[in-house]
Image (tube, grey):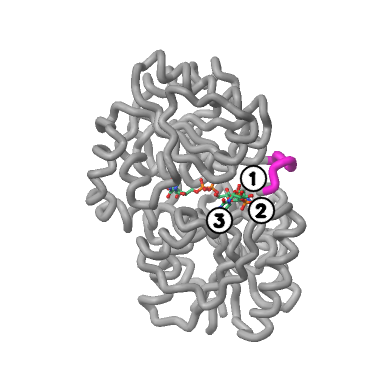
Amino acid sequence: MKISVIVGTRPEIIKMSPIIRECERAQLEYFILHTGQHYSYNMDRVFFEQLELPKPRYNLDVGSGAHAEQTGKILMGVEKILVKEKPDVVLVEGDTNTVLAGALAAAKLHIAVGHVEAGLRSYDRSMPEEINRVLTDHCSDLLFAPTEASKDILLHEGLPEKNIFVTGNTIVDAVFQNMKLAAKKEHIFEEIKLKKSAYFLVTTHRQENVDDHDRFSGILQGLQQLRKDYNLPVVYPLHPRARKKLEEFHFDAEGITLIEPLDYLSFLQLERHAKLVLTDSGGVQEETCILGVPCVTLRDNTERPETVDVGSNVLAGTNPRNIVNAVVRMNRRNKKWENPLGDGTTGAKIVQILREDL
Ligand code: UD1
Ligand code: UDP
């Protein structure tokens, strides 16, 4: 059995890492195909180096661009490689343009597609990710759903039960595998002058937030208010999309500690010891739930409702007053909840299913 593992962006590299490690351990025939959707050192190579992942056999270097342009370039590039390599299965993870194009290229060549993190829905079709998720699920042969709820969504959409496997989410494996190593990153607190449990950590990068003047402005005002109310640092590692928009809109981020995107271990360390995390990231909603850190999501919906149900996460949108109120509410909450996203063996489960099914 030959496996093609497709990655393109930061979260895909992180969430595929447990599967790649498992392929290595089981000495399976596989190769990594990187689309190059993310390419800056701190959005890409740092994760390969730090997680000690093998170099991709191919990198399409597609870079940034409008949706159709980026998706089209990936589609064309992936097709050529799949025709040459003839893998038995292509694995994609998540909901990016890389995922949709990778799955579509494989499906048209009648190569089996395995979708890791299948069955997530925000029910907001204005998000590029929602379109990517739905279409990818519907052209996949193996659907690796993180939870029973995501399996139910897939069944409800008419996808065959025999193709669906509830495996948990590989992000749990990634957190468990890297948490000990992250503890060695203590110096990050000195570097940014932070005291454990006495800062807020922020990430935002969603197109519908940072590309929208009013929504991005609302988020920044909410963060500035938090800085004043709590007199605590608000640390925000800026995703490149957010940096570009911040500059374009000439926003004033006074009072907010803006830093470059962090490597995974440093970010995990900051997440674990934050008083609370504010985010619009999918992966960060999950990681905070796993790490026992309260999360306020700067969105009107989430495709990760399990985190809200267990009490680790609350939706605040982008109105400054709602953001501050959500932080107050989360701070009062009991911080003990069960992690509903898996037990850290998702990578092994997925590889086992591939071995049995193909
Ligand atoms: C993409 C995904 C999003 C995912 C996110 C993870 C899609 C539609 N979006 O969003 O679902 O949550 O990745 O972080 O697939 N840029 C750089 N360096 C890089 C990459 C991007 O400077 O390495 C800048 C460029 O200015 C680019 C912008 O960021 O135009 C956006 O990059 P893009 O890959 O289009 O989307 P993301 O916002 O990163
Ligand atoms: N992350 C990181 N450094 C940072 C910010 C985030 O390593 O400065 C990690 C984070 O731990 C998580 C992943 O990036 O595993 C989330 O990626 P992102 O928010 O870009 O995408 P999403 O999950 O929303 O698709």
Label drawn at residue 352: none
Marks 3/1: CA distance?
A: 11 Å
Tag 1–tag 2 contact (CB < 8 Å):
yes
Marks 3/2: CA distance?
A: 9 Å
Q: Is residue 328 above or below residue 266?
A: above
SS for dot 2: helix
Q: Residues within 10 Å of mark 3 (few under 14, many from 20)?
A: many
The x and y percentages for residue 49 are 38, 64
Q: Is residue 331 above or below residue 123?
A: above
Write the start and end of the magenta stretch as one range.
123-128
Q: Residues within 10 Å of mark 1 (few under 14, many from 20)?
A: many
Q: Which residue is mark 1?
A: 121
For image coordinates 61% across by 29% down, the residue present is 250
Q: Which quadrant would residue 176 be assigned to in this image?
A: bottom left
The x and y percentages for residue 258 are 44, 34
Whichever of labels 3 and 2 marks the residue nearer the N terminus, that label is 3
SS for dot 1: loop
- On the question of residue 310 being in view, the answer is no
Q: Which residue is mark 3?
A: 117
SS for dot 3: loop
Instruction: Please name the amino acid that badge 1 sits on.
Output: Arg
Instruction: Please name the amino acid that badge 2 sits on.
Output: Arg
The x and y percentages for residue 81 are 64, 79
For image coordinates 48% across by 38% down, the residue present is 203
Horizontally, residue 82 falls left or right of residue 3, namely right
Q: Which residue is mark 2?
A: 133
